[in-house]
Amino acid sequence: MVDVIVGIMLAVLGLVICFAGLRVFLLALPALGFISGVFIGAAGVRAIFGDGFFSTATGVIVGLFVGLILAVLSYLFWYVGALIAAGSTGALIGSGLMNFLGATRGWVVFIGAALGAIIVFIIAFRLALPVYVVIVNTAFVGASAIIGGVMLMFNQIDRADLGYGVVWAAIEESWFWIIVWVVLAAVGIGSQLRTIAQVTLPEDRWASANPHAGATA
């Protein structure tokens, strides 16, 4: 019963992120940065020392410290927050790929997650289109959350493994889920693009997120 409730909550959250990700993202940047930092710090401790994910004081302290740093950066610079979110998605993809390939050692999964984060971070930085990075990132993350919620409701994945890339691994194992994931993300991207002109960026309370708005005004 708990898995069903958590699955429903995850699916609903995924719907919000997928179809209204830009609005939600700009409001929740500090929280997202903090959560990403906690997982990065704790996972790093687990990979290096072989401790349980949150079972030791070291993992908790390091996770909170990294989380606070990323939260402050995300609050002060929303573009940094966008890149952090993109890197987090890359980390999930990397860890999911390692699980799909059958990696069982924590340090191997951590290296895969780190490489995924670095690659996606660099791609997002090089594109220099932060608004579109946010839209694409939230659409795909939201789509994966929807699928993860459905899988959890129907007991296809274990709730205890949600933080270890199990959703990505499950999606990558099935062409059906890959197609569903891409279609959901595409619809989410289209939905967000239709409302992009109504979103205001944090640095300029009076400027819309539409990069073409200034040129057409």
Image (cartoon, rainbow, N blue to C red):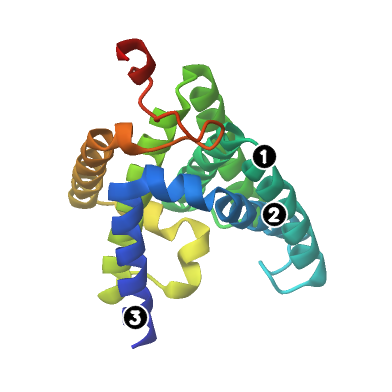
Report helix, strand or loop for mark 3.
helix
**In this picture, residue 191 sits left or right of residue 72:** left
**In this picture, residue 95 sits left or right of residue 185:** right
Report helix, strand or loop for mark 1.
helix
**Residue 96 shows in the view:** yes
Indicate which label's residue lies in the foreground, 1 or 2.
1
Residue drawn at x 34%, y 17% as measured from the top left: 212
- Alpha carbon separation for disc pair 3 and 1: 35 Å
Q: Taking 27 as reference, is 147 above or below it?
A: below
**In this picture, residue 62 sits left or right of residue 86:** right
Label disc, if present, on residue 67 of the rendered structure:
2
Dot 2, crowdedness within 10 Å: few (<14), some or many (≥20)? many
Evaluate if marks 1 and 2 touch, with contact meaning CB atoms under 8 Å apart. Answer: no
Of 213 and 93, nearer the camera is 213
- Alpha carbon separation for disc pair 1 and 2: 14 Å
Question: Label 3 is placed on what type of residue?
Answer: Ile
Whichever of labels 3 and 2 marks the residue nearer the N terminus, that label is: 3
How many numbered circles are shown?
3
- Residue 92, percent from left and from top: 49, 48
Question: Label 2 is placed on what type of residue?
Answer: Gly
Report helix, strand or loop for mark 2.
helix
Q: Residue furthest top?
A: 215
Evaluate if marks 3 and 1 touch, with contact meaning CB atoms under 8 Å apart. Answer: no
- Residue 113, percent from left and from top: 57, 44
User: On the image, numbered disc 3 is attached to which residue?
Assistant: 5
Label disc, if present, on residue 76 of the rendered structure:
1
Q: In which quarter of the image is the N terminus?
A: bottom left
Residue drawn at x 36%, y 52% as measured from the top left: 17
Whichever of labels 3 and 1 marks the residue nearer the N terminus, that label is: 3
